[in-house]
Image (cartoon, coloured by chain):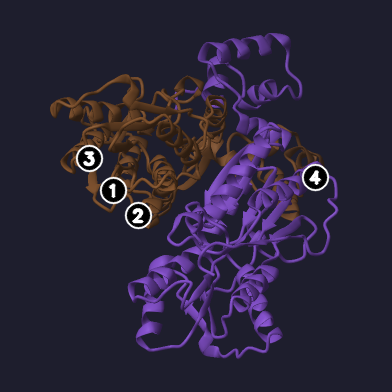
Chain colours: A purple, B brown
Amino acid sequence: MKSNKISMKEIARLSGVSIATVSRIINENGRYSDETRQRVMDIIDKYQYETNSIAKSLRMNRSQTIGVLVPDINNEFFSVIVQEIESFFFDLGYSTIICNTAKSAEKEKEYLKILDSKMVDGLVCISGQEEVLTDVLKRKVPIVCIDRRPKIDSNVAFIASDHYAGGFIATEELIRKGCRRILVLTKQQNLSSVNERLNGFSDAMLKHNLVLGKEQYVTIQSDHNNLDAAKQKVQQLIENKMKFDGIFATNDWLGLGALLALQENGIQVPGEVKIVGFDNDTISKYCNPPLTTINQDKAALASKACGILLEMIEGKTPKIEEHQLLPVNLVERQTT
Amino acid sequence: MKSNKISMKEIARLSGVSIATVSRIINENGRYSDETRQRVMDIIDKYQYETNSIAKSLRMNRSQTIGVLVPDINNEFFSVIVQEIESFFFDLGYSTIICNTAKSAEKEKEYLKILDSKMVDGLVCISGQEEVLTDVLKRKVPIVCIDRRPKIDSNVAFIASDHYAGGFIATEELIRKGCRRILVLTKQQNLSSVNERLNGFSDAMLKHNLVLGKEQYVTIQSDHNNLDAAKQKVQQLIENKMKFDGIFATNDWLGLGALLALQENGIQVPGEVKIVGFDNDTISKYCNPPLTTINQDKAALASKACGILLEMIEGKTPKIEEHQLLPVNLVERQTT
């Protein structure tokens, strides 16, 4: 599809001047006579050449655009945060362009390059890969990472929920309700957010002198659908006559998968097995029975991240504490 | 925040030539001596100036980027389609930038301008406003609209589910299961997709000689949360002793809201009142009881839209039938 816009080259040809002269006139930069200027402007008006905002941002080095890298736009935790970011920055005159990396390192690299080349003024990277691949960036763009610990760098800030506390609270909830043989159900991935939830789990188990062995860590493959894989895995555990009375699922979809497998086998929840999920996704509220879970404050995460990014864009050095962790809380429903 | 990239102006100063000469050399366009070229290239290498992809796309008029306008990234129907579009185009070497318009006409205009200025090669517009505001575009970009009827224009294609059939099938399902006093629960908005669902509803009622009056159209305000507003509205109907035995909800969240209100009032679903939703969102499968609904084939919608857009980008004229409507189907669960 050919653009209906006239090129600089065409303008130069039609007005009988060099491309460099057209460029100088458009950019109002350098020498040219009034007469030449008029000739060029007439051609431009005639063909409605518009210096588009790309040309402008090349000169100004500001695009009033924020880039957001998100690993899975179809995950409620991420989509809510992205919405909040968009809304925050729109009110300040910034547009937000969102890139869905589908948890692929290759895509993440590609999109970082794209956002860099589109001259975004700042980036929000939401967890996906273990490390932020900032080495693909050519400009020193301010970056705020949510849920992903970046390498120490002056232009990268970090913010996350207190995942460790979440894992600890979830496990203590199960223990308080009488569980003694507790499994943790998680995805096989090496994300700091998930690792910290697991640390919270094991510390709570140790604090209460409960047995903790390898077999209590039940993992599903990272590329599998949370719900289906969790359901299948718990089905296997039941068939293998594994004994357990509590499950801490590191996200709500895993928790729901476990719940469905237990129900299909006639095992009472919370009577025989109790479950705590993580994230407080909408599904946890409306499934049956509603899932006890750990709530992350998505709005606060987004607004903190935006505030920090804005300060960095404006050239201020934001006051970032070493651990910028937001509190989480238990939402007690009917699976515990 | 200052960019760490050296500007053309700086390069010109350091190599002792004019900015126009630097531009000619970078763009390999126009006259300059080998010696001058070497001098400028040395400075560029030294400071790692990179002609970024914006500068390139200005010359090439191709950005290998697709823009997607989506009214609500937190709505599963949209987020699934956006994911499919991203995946389709990434495999072809295109990147996708997503803009969340939050159903605001102002934002939609702004983002259309942004995507235009970022020189996207094609656009996918998912419903939000009644009309596509293509008049803000400066270039003739190929556009595919999903769920939104565009003005007739050579560069705009349209694709949607057969919403009329969906409304008809949903209503006939209620009638077949014995409902006679059927309400339709919908949002107050003028979207073609919703209007067609309502037309399907009324035609099915007429076909079966059922009474159809104004009071059977129950609407909630468009800016309200689907679930909460629907729940509140149905609560009011119950308090007002309105008689009804079936509800066709034009989306699953409205259906779930109705279900919750009925349950809180001890009204049996499906025993006393039956409900059919629309969209087959995940929530419809896992709520209690699971909701009967109309399934839209999101993957097919996305892949059709992508195929058409690609053809348009490649300068072909896609064979678009006048009504590019994809079939829907009933998913019978436990609310009917």
Dots 1, 2 in contact, CB < 8 A:
yes
* Marks 4/1: CA–CA distance: 55 Å
Q: Nearer the viewer, mark 1 or mark 2?
A: 1
Q: Which residue is mark 1?
A: B270
Q: Nearer the viewer, mark 2 or mark 4?
A: 2
Q: Mark 2 is on which residue type?
A: Pro
Dots 2, 3 in contact, CB < 8 A:
no
Does the image show residue A16?
yes
* Marks 4/3: CA–CA distance: 56 Å
Q: Which residue is mark 3?
A: B174
Are the residues under marks 2 and 3 on the same chain? yes
In this view, B258 is above or below A72 = above
Q: Is residue A307 left or right of residue A177?
A: right
Q: Could you say where residue A201 lies in the image, as x and y percent from the top left?
A: 63, 78
* Marks 1/2: CA–CA distance: 9 Å
* Mark 2 residue crowding within 10 angstroms, few (<14) / some (14–19) / many (20+): some
Image point 51% across, 31% down: which residue?
Answer: B103
Does the image show residue A225?
no
On what subunit does the disc labeled 1 rest? Answer: B
Q: Could you say where residue B179 lies in the image, as x and y percent from the top left?
A: 22, 38
Q: Which residue is mark 4?
A: A311
Tell which circle, 2 or 3, labels the residue nearer the N-terminal end.
3
Q: Mark 3 is on which residue type?
A: Leu
